[in-house]
Image (spheres, rainbow, N blue to C red):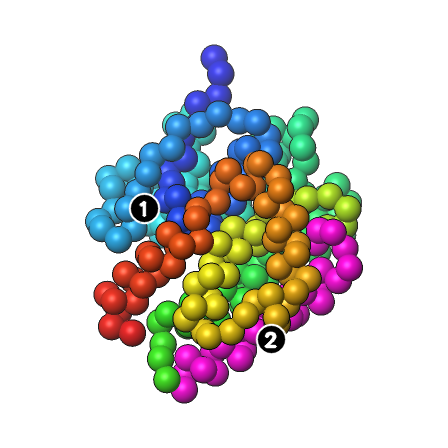
């Protein structure tokens, strides 16, 4: 009996995109069960992730795995004979986990303030976000990818958020390319990989969804 994989999915979600890229990197086939985050959550999502009630959720032979980075690591460990995602050395693995966690807990929450706040608070968030992006660019340095010469865990963890660049620029009135040119070049390099480009949502679609979300928030 083969592996049955079901992904509780929302195509514009950068967190779900991480899982789609990981599955593509491993050459794994799966069934996508699409959610609409702008409406009510499905019974499947509530059953498979009753604690946080968030997607993505990967269901492997009936068993759910939750939280995007945990799912990516699960995929890497479960199918470890092809295209390793995490570095093999313990220090490099911890380094990769640090930067993806930093992005999730520090960088993206600041970015979200561009559509959840307004006025002076929004302007302050924009400045803080640009500085946070520059920290990420400094970590990238002159390397082709965050992990070195090849696409890896940090790249996989962060590249889905490049689909928000257009949204960041439109709502924040700044240019990511002007502020962080190396970061934009890195994103373009990642997008040359079909496992990445085929897994990501169109940036203009993301912008439309964020505008709808802003309208609901009254911001």
- Label 2: how many residues lie within 10 Å, few (<14), some (14-19) or many (20+)? some
Is 127 placed above or below 175 here? Answer: below
Q: Could you tell me residue 105's position as x and y percent?
A: 52, 64
Question: What residue is disc 2 on?
Answer: 131
Q: Could you tell me residue 93's position as x and y percent?
A: 70, 49
Q: Which stretch appears magenta? A: 120-146
Question: What residue is disc 1 on?
Answer: 50
Q: Could you tell me residue 116's position as x and y percent?
A: 35, 71
Which of the two residues, 31 or 3, is positioned nearer the viewer here? 31
- Label 1: how many residues lie within 10 Å, few (<14), some (14-19) or many (20+)? few
| Picture mark count | 2
In the image, is residue 131 part of the stretch drawn in magenta?
Answer: yes
Magenta residues: mostly which secondary structure?
Answer: helix
Identity of the residue furthest to the top in this view:
1
Which of the two residues, 96 or 185, is positioned nearer the viewer here? 185
Disc 1/disc 2 C-alpha distance (Å) = 36 Å
Which of the two residues, 102 or 65, is positioned nearer the viewer here? 102
Left or right for 78, reference 219: right
């Amino acid at each position: 009996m083969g592996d049955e994989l079901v992904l509780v999915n929302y195509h514009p979600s950068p967190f779900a995109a991480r899982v789609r890229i990981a599955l593509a990197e491993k050459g794994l086939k799966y069934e996508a069960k699409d959610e609409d985050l702008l409406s009510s959550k499905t019974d499947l999502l509530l059953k498979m992730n009753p604690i946080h009630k968030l997607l993505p959720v990967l269901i492997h032979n009936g068993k759910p795995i939750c939280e995007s980075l945990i799912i990516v690591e699960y995929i890497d460990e479960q199918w470890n004979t092809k295209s390793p995602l995490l570095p093999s050395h313990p220090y490099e693995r911890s380094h990769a986990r640090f930067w993806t966690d930093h992005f999730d807990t520090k960088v993206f929450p600041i970015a979200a303030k561009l559509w959840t706040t307004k006025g002076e608070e929004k302007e302050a968030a924009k400045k803080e976000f640009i500085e946070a992006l520059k920290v990420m660019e400094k970590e990238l340095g002159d390397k082709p990818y965050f992990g070195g010469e090849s696409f890896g865990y940090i790249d996989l963890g962060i590249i889905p958020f490049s689909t928000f660049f257009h949204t960041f620029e439109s709502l924040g009135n700044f240019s990511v390319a002007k502020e962080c040119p190396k970061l934009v070049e890195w994103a373009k390099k990642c997008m040359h990989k079909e496992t990445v480009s085929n897994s990501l949502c169109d940036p203009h679609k993301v912008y439309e969804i964020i505008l709808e979300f802003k309208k609901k928030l009254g911001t």
